[in-house]
Amino acid sequence: MSRQVRKLSATGYYHIVFRGINHQSLFEGDSDFLYFIESLQQIKAEMAFEIHAYCLMSNHVHLLLKENKTGDISQIMKRLLTKYVMYFNKKYERSGALIASRYKSTPVVIDEYFIPLIRYIHQNPVKAGIVGKLEEYKFSSYRDYVQGGRLTDTGFSLSLLGRDEWVRLHQMSTDDDFDVSGKINLSEDEVRRKILRSTEGREPHEIAGWSKPERDAMLRQLKEKEGLSIRQIERATGISRGVIARS
């Protein structure tokens, strides 16, 4: 079976996620994290793309990139992952795949979710219990935003809110969950039709007024059976992202 063609971003921005195969660690020590960051910086200099956020966790990585030319993202990721896997395999005397399946890439729209996406990326180490504060984690772009740094392109994100508000929003604990499944985005009408089918003709906004058990059961059905993302359900129903995530 042929692989699905990746959807190109109209804005040039992509949220990239990749994981270690079979939950294997991608980084065994600080030197591995640093090698990956150095590789990212080197390829960025050569291909002139932008890095708006990153977070390297032990067994997965988040990147928010903006390509210079349409379609560059495939070459960027091929070069980055090939370089790192060759380094890792040689260092730890192993062979074979390191990355689970293909990396996930989701086109990003510059809207009200842009800053929450960056916050979601940066909050990974805190939510995982690795550190207590965002600034304590060494291998994310958060420090570049608050202390300055060469790798991350911080100007655009900070210009949207101002530094103080940007930092304040990052300190908020959230239940953000951004879909990185690579599924094709549905139009609002298509999402509405899916919900109408599940609710047997009841309008999406009515779900918020249902009893909690009935509401949560429907939200689970929309996520699990209809394959709708939390963001799609939120926009269609008006129910908060946190409620949908916990249902």
Image (tube, grey):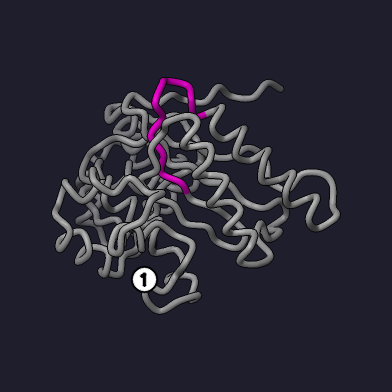
Q: Position of 23 compared to 103: left or right?
A: right
Query: 99 or 202: nearer the eye?
Result: 99
Q: Position of residue 79 (x, y in %)?
A: 61, 34
Q: Is residue 232 left or right of residue 239?
A: right
Q: For the N terminus, give its image quadrant.
A: top right
Q: Is residue 218 magenta?
A: no
Label 1, residues with CA under 10 Å away: few <14, some 14-19, many ≥20: some
Residue at the spot 15% in from the left edge and 61% down from the top edge: 165
Report the amino acid beneath label 1. Glu
> What is the quadrant of residue 32 in the picture?
bottom right
Name the residue located 34 percent from the left edge and 63 percent from the top edge: 175
Asked which quadrant contains residue 78, the reply is: top right
User: Residue most toward the bottom?
Assistant: 132
Q: Position of residue 74 (x, y in %)?
A: 55, 28
Q: Residue at x 25, y 68 (%)?
A: 172
Query: Does residue 47 sit above or below 153 in this rendering?
Result: above
| Residue depicted at 22% across the width and 64% down the height | 167
> Where the C terminus falls, by quadrant?
bottom left
Q: Position of residue 122 (x, y in %)?
A: 39, 60
Kindly identify which residue carries mark 1.
135
Magenta residues span: 63-73
Q: Can you say whether 4 is above or below 208 in the image?
A: above
Q: Secondary structure at mark 1?
A: helix
Q: How many marks?
A: 1
Residue 34 lies, in percent from the top left, at 57, 58
